Amino acid sequence: MAMVLTAFITKFLTVLSSYAEEESVMLLGVPEDINKLQRRLTRLENVLNDAEDREITERAIKHWLKELRDFMYDAEDIIEEYLLRTKARANNTSSSSLCWSPISCIPVSLFRHEIGLRIKNLNIRLDEILKDKEIFSFSTIVINQHNVSRGVTSRRTSSLVEQDLVGMKIEEDTKCLVELLMKDDQRAEENIEVFAITGMAGIGKSTLARKIFNNEILVSHFYPMPTGWVSVCQDFSEIDILRTCVRVFGGNPGELTASKQDLEDKLCELVENKRFFLVLDDVWDAKVWKELLNEPLRSCAKGSRVLVTTRDEAVAKGMQAVHQHQVEKLRDVDGWALLSKSFVLEDDEQDLKRLKDIGMEIVKKCDGLPLAIKAIAGVLIAKERNRETWNHVLQDSAWKLTGILPDGVMGSLYLSYKNLKSPLKQCFMYLSLFPKSNLYQGVLARLWIAEGFIDETQSSLSPYELAIQYWEELIERNILQPNPAYYNNEGCILHDLFQSLAQHLAKDECFYGNVQSFSETVSTGPSSSKSFVNPRRLYIVDREAKSIPESLKELKSLRSLLVQMPSISIFPRDVFKKLKSLRIIDFSGSSIEKLPESIGSLILLRYLELSQSHIKEIPESIGNLINLHSLILLKCKNLKRLPNGVTSLKSLQNLNLDGTPIEAMPKGIERLHKLRVLTGCVLSKNSNNSDPHCSLEDMKSLSVLQHLCLHNLETVTSKDEAISASMRAKEKLRNLELYCTMNQDCQEEDINRIQEVFEELCPSKSLAVLIIDGYFGREYPNWITKLSTFIPYLKRLELVNCKQCKKLPSLGSLYFLDYLDITGASSVTEIGPEFFAIENNTTCCFPKLTHLYFCGMTNWEEWSWINEDEARTLRLTPLKKLQKLVLNGCPKLRSLPEGLLSHCTALTDLALVSANNVKEMKNLYSVKHILVMDCESLIEVSNLTHLYRLMITKCRKLVVVERLDELQDLVLDDQEMETLPEWLLTAAGEGKFSRIQKMDFESNAQLLSRCLMNGPEWMKFSYMPLVRGYTPGVTSYIVYTKDPLSFVSKLPDVTVGNDGGGSGGDVGAGSSEDAGIST
């Protein structure tokens, strides 16, 4: 299986219907052939669901569907090329007698004959396919509520906690394995011991390993070496594995050549005489250890550990694991609990109780595997909650595919796929091209659109908005797992079993691998015995190869070509002349400096990306790409100009230039009426009429923009130019970024002009994100001071480096604002009640704001709150949802406002950096995490009853730290610190830090030597469960754990003071080697 024919044919028929009656089609004399094609494809629609269900088990149907898919790909290429040619010809005749594109220069008679013949041949091929259909006796399936789930409309209240994935035993198993991994076996012959977690696919091995990996006690045991996690795929690259190991152990593989020997030497050097902990996740073959990593890691110190997760016990034995832990299946009762937690339980608890008997039967079919249960939960959550629907899931034929699908993929996962809408099935299969842990929302959304997977005909949303909705639905269905390292689900992980399913379904069409595996498995001939014959999509990742395989040029049906090859610097000369079906090209990160002129022959191309490449020049022939939707050129440091041909890209929707030093945009951008995203757009004065550039007034005709980023606004000559841009009329605009630069010789005339210009840049009410950077007017524009009137739906606002404005605008009435950043407002001396100003008799006052940043406010002295009496009268609670407050670079601010205490009851994170006049921080009852840094006058931190983590850097006058009842994590950082703070000793004597779990401090070797057991500083921290001290670069360190007692140190020759210091006979203070005791 590959192309989802139900989705593909439905969209293809829509295209045929919309164009069959066009005048240009009638003139070419082929409407009847198109109508015939349309009628025959319509007959196929109702049998495709049955055919695609049966192809997994019936080889003959699989071959028939492959023939039909090949036909549909060819048909789309022919029809799309035909339509593009007719458009090009129409554009050419209406604009000029000259040929602006090669495809419009073919004589009409020749063009009519060629297209007519190709469409007739399509009908002949389809006739043969329809004849063969009759032998399979397909059932006609009408889609109803049981066959395909509706879209997920309600989000669950919370994600499943880790222990849900492997049952309630996870805490017990974690504790047991952590103790085993830390236990010193004096009888061990090797410096490294291997431990293994084994079990069936989808049972939770990686989750248990991650729980162990994050265990603080274990991390401290192997300190100062960082613990390492390496995901090992089935077809792993030795170079990539070595590079990852170097990186996780603190090295920089980017500084090295791609040589395997160099990487091995570097890895050996990094671990030499050091004790480390490394997780190798999802290992399929013991040779990754025996033949690759064992030798370079053997230079380590005794007690090093490797934890491996694998489905195959033989792999664990092959790696000579000293201990194997088998993860057990969930009991049925635990499985039902896991399934139940997937639903919003507000009014559904009774419904679930009535469905429990069916639910338990479904759980039994999941065979105790958490992943299978989560997959089925993703199916059920999108269906009606009644017995008929759940019974239909229970009886579905997909369950029988367990054991038939490859790599341990369960029928429940196929059932999850089967219940996706047809367009979403295509999006899921496309994930097979990518590493399972590197999936990014924005990238995949644009690629899905370029491939034609997004069916916007049934939605009022834009294609990009719909693609994001698809992404969210894959998360809701538990197919994609949000990566916690990314904001707002922008990065996700695909479980390896779902990846195996996607690869199986797409295996005839999608290839991912390096150049060598491409040469070994991909063929261009129909009679080849290789795994891939004429694939449609390629993703080649190879750090060593310097050129594209020559055989790639013969893949004439290729649609997606994604290449991650840093060393490639040149294209084969005629590669694009042969790959005529390409829709997507991505050579990000390559060393290519110039595109070949032949790029202009790819008239079907929709997506071109060269981000972070060495590209210096883009040919004018790019103007021939009349179907191009996205041109992505992010951070191309060598690219100074765009070709004028860019202005001919009439279909262009995304032009992304952020981080690319374009000196000026070519004149003619205003002709790109379909642009939705334009970032990195540089404005300039048109002083040279022979080479005109894009100006602000050229934005007028770009009426469907959704994201606009303008630079060099100081070059705008008058407000008339800003008026001409018609910013207020851009009703679809959601993101607006305005950048300008104040020159050192800025005159009063310049200041007045920039104020006038910005006054005319007021966007439409639909705006959600506004960033203004470098504005040098003395007053904000009128619309900025009344944002709740002009832009009432604003969610994010950043005012950066508006250095001359002495007052901030009143922002409290912005109902939807959740993120506010004021940076570099160096003329502001006071923020008062007007900041919270209540307009239009409304009682809202930052009702949704969660993140607030004040940075670089070098002259800000006073922050006063709204009047308490007025607040009570109006029943106001300013900033009631504020969660994070950052004050950075506010050296004159005298104190925090009292209102923070009574109103900001949701505040959990507070950072105070370089606030030199603030003397105290106390009575903030909701705060859980605090960072105070370089606060020279800070004396007291107290009465923070929910504080969990406190980080203190260079606050040398701080003498009172008390009433921190919940404090568990303390961090101190001061390289000039001679002794640990005295308040630590006070806390020890009075038991004030009764719940503290650990303390980390960075200082100097002199202080570390005072912290040895029974040394001068010993009593200040000996009551804590875990203490780690280190110098910058971790050249010296101490690590102390209370239970079990352990003290390890590495110190240079340092003389300890005469006040009773020393090692207490346990550890030599002058030792240059690791030393320690443990019991």
Image (cartoon, rainbow, N blue to C red):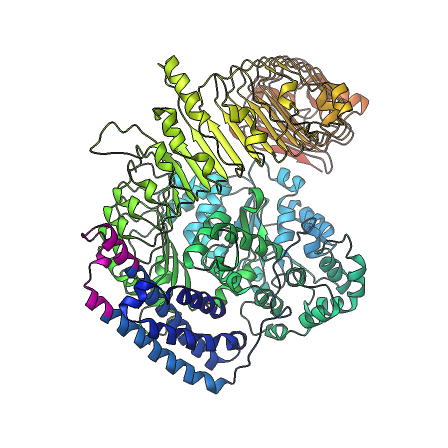
User: Which residues lie in the magenta part?
Assistant: 87-112
Task: State the residue in front, 36 or 723.
Answer: 723
Q: Looking at the rendering, in which quadrant would you find the C terminus?
A: top right
Residue 97 colored in magenta in the image = yes
Residue 498 colored in magenta in the image = no
Which percent across, then down, holds residue 1064? 69, 24
Please state if 180 lies on the left or on the right of 556 as rendered: right
Please state if 665 lies on the left or on the right of 1005 as rendered: left
Residue located at (29% from left, 61% from top): 86
Please state if 711 lies on the left or on the right of 791 as rendered: left
Which percent across, then down, holds residue 1040? 67, 32
Task: State the residue in front, 252 or 27.
Answer: 27
Residue 887, relative to residue 860: is it above or below? below
Outermost residue toward the bottom?
Answer: 135
Residue 845, relative to residue 210: is it above or below? above
Residue 740 appears in the figure: yes
Residue 9 image-quadrant placement: bottom left
Q: How many marks?
A: 0
Magenta stretch: helix, strand or loop mostly: helix
Residue 272 appears in the figure: no
Task: State the residue in front, 272 or 625.
Answer: 625
Residue 889 image-quadrant placement: top right
Which percent across, then down, holds residue 496? 55, 59
Residue 419, relative to residue 439: is it above or below? below
Which percent across, then down, holds residue 123? 35, 77
